[in-house]
Amino acid sequence: MVLLGLLFLQISVLLVVGDGDGCDRDTSGSGGDLIDLHIIGFFPCTHPADKREYPVDNCDGIDRIPIMKLALEEINERCDLLSGYRLVIDYANSGCASIPATYHLIQQTDPEVPTKLMILGPACSIASELMGEVAQRYMNITQVAYTVSSSLFGKDKVRFPRFYRLVTITEQVADGYVALIEKLNWKRVTVITDEDELNINAGIHTEEKLTSQRVLTRMTFIDDPSEVIKSIEELRARIIVAWIHPRMAVQFWCKVVKRNLAGPDFVWFIPGWFRANWWAAVDGTDCTAEEMKKSLEHTLGGLGNGILDYDPDRVLVSKKTVAQFKQDLNKKNELLGPVKTDIFLNIGYVYDTAWTIALALNASTSMLEEKGLGRLEEYHSEWTEMSDVLTASVASVSFEGISGKVSFHNTSGNRRNPSTRIIQYRDGVAVPIQIYVPSQQDNNFIELPGQSLVWQGGYIPKDAPSPVIQHRSKAETAIVAVTAAVGILSTTFFLLFNVYNRKHLVVKRSSYRLNCVILSGILMGYIGTALYTIEPDDGTGHVPAALLCNLRYWMTEMAFVICFATFFTKIWRLYKVFFNKHLAERKRLKDHYLLLAVGGIVAPALAVLIIQASTYPVTLHSHAKINKDNLAQEEITFMCQGRYHLAFDTVLIIIRMILGIFSLKVAFETKKHLPTEKKYRKYHESAVINLSTIVAIVPSSICEIIVLVFELNNIQTGLLLIITLRECVWMYPMSYLLFVPKSLFIVNM
């Protein structure tokens, strides 16, 4: 068993240090006055390129080891800490995987292996899950992790009853995001997560922390983020919090770049723990490294604050200042060879974890004595009461660590409230800008010396594009206004002329009453067209706008049906006169019968309009579209639409077409079968006029379909002209062809 343990590289490290601060304490390991207290420290010693996830030859090259040795030296030099004891860490390689970590834990049951009082680490959540459950639930060993960030360990108290951690977990980084969002008064926020459990929990936490008024939506993608990114564009989102795994980062951000969703008008929050220059790994994407780098400018992020160094004079638990600590760490790194000590790494948590365990063990000595449970060197994990004391002693710890204040008071019981470092990308580099400290009440954000938030456009981006109302062009409105005005004046003249000459033989023969109905319908259509020049985008309320929408809609639709229904009855009477063998039948075709027929034809269209008005009336709707030339602007157009507007309009178009087809058929048959005698010449001319007028229904119906296409696609430009053409293409021919010849004939008599 011992040989197998050596095979997997379990290295016991005993530090030899001299006396410090006048303390006459022998920490050399050769004296018999100090008793070794062993803990096991899990570190991911596997080389990143080693896919086997098994140990390699050397752990000392890992960046966490130097700071751990520095912490042990400081702890063992203190005379007022662990009197009579020396803290020893037995290093084990967790490999950032479950099996190696659990294997090394099981080795601790070997009688020849020193008893471990606590577990320090590991670094990865996956390495801690099985190992942590076995250690805490079945072996009664307390675990203090430095960078295990999964929320699972805080929620499942059954599997992990003796778990503590010092890292800033993703939910706490989210708290920093939320605080900054509220500080900058952004009201519309979109949250995106991938399928990773940590990120999903962080996304849910972000949504819960933000008020319901602030969250626009929360979306999750599995492998391909294309649909989610497309939704961002459709939602016109500007402030986006993205919780994504490093393996998805390049693919995700490239799609953001290609959709033109990054730049001065957008604010992205992305995880701050991506490796340096992650954006440059563009192989297999459609982006270049330069595109990725440029698009990241001023993007925000957050990560745990492993080394809180904004105040170099802050005194730590070791009685050193932050400045002195960094000097000592640099010396330690020089002695141990080249290692990375970038402040973005989580090495500060390792240092504070060692001090947490040392202070907890120190506190447990008096607690054990009070309870009469023996001494630390007598500890055995099967002794549950002693294990409970060790677990409780961690909760009592409170000190000033390199990562900030370490205290488990007033929290969930297994984690502290550490600070979060807010970063902002500058020229492809994640630059620390602010420190978010949740314990501070007045101002939770501490700006780092010489740093402040900078915005690409020189202004704080808005959480939504600035609305710009799109108005119709003045030229378009003028054309429609003049066209409608000419139609109103001419139709009014024809109507008055028809009334004035109602007893004239020409007017009487052409059905004076029916002419008045046709002209009234045409006048209604022109007025309805004129109403389209008034834009219903008033800000005083939707009642006037809704009234205007329905009024012009009803007037233009009813004008067509009334005119063509009346016109059809006139043609039908002419048809009956020449095709009915019984001349007496002609006497029955009086105007009042024809007016009843008009009412019967108009009734279906009127019923459709009444049903629509009582169920899904036409109201004012606003439609937004991003200005492609200026992403900070949102083009707002106002359209008069109703629910199932397309269905109702389709029914009205069908009624138009049926009416037009029957009118055309009757007019054609009448002209074809009219007698050729000279006395019937006027009827031939009338039939030609009727036929020409009815033909106008074809382009009118085509224009109606085009109007529907424009409205469904919220196209404002040219819509007014198409509506005008739809109405005038039949109103002008009907009024001028029918009444100009009559008027000229009467005037010239």
Image (spheres, rainbow, N blue to C red):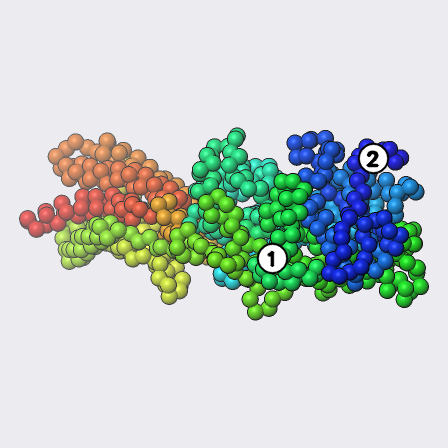
Q: Residue drawn at (57%, 69%), measured in percent from left and top?
A: 442
Q: Work out whether residue 243 can be spotted.
A: no
Lateral position of residue 216 relative to residue 702, left or right: right
The residue to which callout 1 is attached is 323
Q: Residue drawn at (10%, 47%), measured in percent from left and top?
A: 745
User: Which element carries disc 1, helix, strand or loop?
Assistant: helix
Determine which quarter of the picture holds residue 629.
top left
> Which x, y percent locates residue 195?
63, 42
Three-letter amino acid code at disc 2?
A: Leu
Which one is nearer the viewer's eye here, 430 or 469?
430
* Structural distance between the alpha carbons of marks 2 and 1: 39 Å
> Which x, y percent locates residue 648?
43, 47
Tell me which numbered mark, 2 or 1, is placed earlier along the sequence: 2
Q: Residue drawn at (30%, 38%), measured in percent from left and top?
A: 698
The residue to which callout 2 is attached is 6
Examine the rendered structure and indicate whether residue 183 appears above or below residue 455.
below
Three-letter amino acid code at disc 1?
A: Ala
User: Which element carries disc 2, helix, strand or loop?
Assistant: helix
Lateral position of residue 411 relative to residue 274, left or right: right
Which one is nearer the viewer's eye here, 467 or 499?
467
Q: Are marks 2 and 1 in contact (CB under 8 Å)?
A: no
Determine which quarter of the picture holds residue 708.
top left
Q: Residue drawn at (88%, 55%), measured in percent from left and top?
A: 33
Which one is nearer the viewer's eye here, 353 or 410?
353
For marks 2 and 1, give the one nearer the viewer.
1
